Amino acid sequence: MTATAQGFKLFGFQEEAAQALREAALRWIAHAVDTDIPKLGTSPIPFTGQLKAVTGAGKTPILAEVVGSLGDAVVIWTSKSSAVVEQTYNNLRARYRGLLPETGVTVLRNRPNQPEWQALINGDHGLTIWVLTTAAWNEAEAAKSGGAEDARLNLHRPNQLDWAGPEAPWSQLRTKLRRPLWIVSDESHNQTDTQLDQLAILRPVGFFMASATPVHGDLFDEWQRVLNREPDWKALLAAGQVPVRTRDVVAAELLKTTIDLIDYQSGTEESLDGALEALQGLENAVADEGASVVPRAIYVVEKSNVPRGSLEEPRPVVIWRYLRAQGVPADEIAVFTDTRDLPQEAEKISSLSKLLPRHRHIIFNQSLQEGWDDPEAYVCYFDGVTRSFLRVRQIVGRVLRQPGAQRYVSETLNTATLILNTPSEAYEQVLNDLRAELRLYAPDNEPDQPVIRLKTRRDPLPEQPVRAEWIDQLTLPVQTLDLPGTGMADQERTLKTEGERTWPQDALEAPGLGRRSVLSLANEELERTELIEVLRGARTMNGIYLRRRLAARNRNALNAADPTTYMNGPAFQQSSCQGSEAQQRLTQLADRSPTTTKIASAMTTTSTPTTSSGPSQHTARGRATCCRHSSSPPTPSTHEVTSTTTNWPSRKLSTPTVAAFGRATPTAAATATTYPFRSRSATL
């Protein structure tokens, strides 16, 4: 990371992206001064910078670093989402303030007062950033005409003498501004062609567009066609397209690694119970690991109020009451909806900035999803029926950010949980669409290897290969247990001999007890039940009896012995009664006197080179032999194992030791067996 003022730090990849954008913009200006400003007709073509980065990459601090180094300027920083705008405004004044110049910086929100407006328009020096929602200026006809008395928005209405003067504020930004104007469009994929045209009317020096997907519009495409005719301008245009590599975001541990998608196929209460259970699991993981994380759950409703005349309660109220009934304190629940009638205890907040650390449960509606940015939001409950992925898509990016920018040992703390109710006919489509969305987070050179895994109750997590940098450098210890000498062969010969000696009939039989019940037909009641003696008790095939006895006594011995030794012989095909002479002998064979055997000499370790078809996406933090924290490949150690066993020896009980693989799937060539190593949180 690169340290900045006031404690905030940029990661190296963020600093590189900021520097690339800054240099591209300054080279554009320098070339325009040396030659001439490119034009489309008579209108100047502005610089167009495109920051392409996935959610969680830190687009806001990157852009703050860029605009902070542009010198004297006015910046209109805009986004469709009011939540994004409010969060950006607060961060520029606090968390990211150190990325801006130490002096001469003004950050505005909404309508400025008269002195602030005069300083913005007439000032020659300093950096002024005006953070606005798209809704604050989006009025196409008024923007084109330079303002109108009947304009819907203040920015396009003239004669606002209390702060802006006789000319419409939007028109003044185009004609009277004395400093260069730059436009920052956050989440620019949400901007329509009409909205982009309105921003272009202001004739800015340049645009900085931030989005995970490229921004296209008729005007922007026309600018590109003009610039591509000149090699120099074409090169400068290309320099402004700055992608942030997804693998850098992953390496910085800014994203969670797994999404757990749960459909309880039941009602509201069961799904809310699942959300509370998931949150409790997170709290337990935090306590076990000593992590400084306060997990949150969010509850997304479709509508804040019920139709007029309905006797039902609004869904935010239903959720609030259920959480309270389950023991959640009222002061831990925040309601961020426009619900009219809430319980007296319910705490309603007017903006995300009003959230406090004690708010562990946040209820909000569909229209407010975009812009939520809290890495500690781990659990998301979707109220009602989810029939398409569109509803899920808007929230996925909000819960993928990783708190503390670090992986945790507990996979629970690296996992976001989505709880929804989806009709069976729509479930597969929602699942496939979510997988497609996660491919946006795949490394640039491996588009089919998303770094965020998806698990469901139906599908376990996919196997993870060995990290690329450790291929051909690690060996996989395969530990096997065996008795020295010919112990196993001797025992198998004994079983085979016993299996060839058939039992006489009297050795197979033994008396037993039966049960008789007497039912009265008169009153249809059970009068009595009594035990009676029978000539022969229940019978069990000898081979099955021996197998069951071995399993109860020592399952390892059962797995070690070749089943053909005790299942194919004619004596093992016979059936015997409980308590018979035959079963007593079989019991003796299985229940040899236990001994404490030191088998260090019986343990052998075979080192097999690891193989992989590609790099794994993650390695869990904190494992003692985790490859990312090891300076060299781990070396298998010699173990001494003391185990209580029967005289049945263990035949090649292959147990792969998973060391230095994170969530790898090693293949042991010596045993020709693949051992998948799944996450502890895998839902099978």
Image (tube, helix red, strand yellow):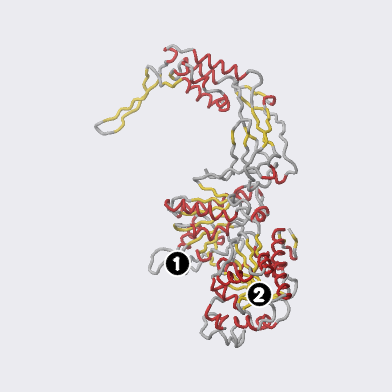
Q: Amino acid at mark 1?
A: Asn
Answer with left or right where residue 226 lies relative to residue 105. Answer: left
- Spot occupied by residue 38 in the image (x, y as percentages of width and height): 66, 75
The residue tagged 2 is: 38
Kindly tell me whether residue 677 is visible in this rendering.
Answer: yes
Say whether residue 282 is visible.
Answer: no
- Real-space Cα separation, disc 2 to disc 1, in angstroms: 53 Å
Residue furthest to the left: 522
Q: Which mark is residue 305?
A: 1
Q: Which mark is residue 241?
A: none
Q: Residues within 10 Å of mark 1 (few under 14, many from 20)?
A: some
Task: Find residue 268 and report its horizontal and vertical position in percent.
Answer: 45, 55
Task: Identify which amino acid the numbered label 2 is placed on.
Answer: Pro
| Disc 2 secondary structure class | loop
Secondary structure found at label 1 = loop
For marks 2 and 1, give the one nearer the viewer: 2
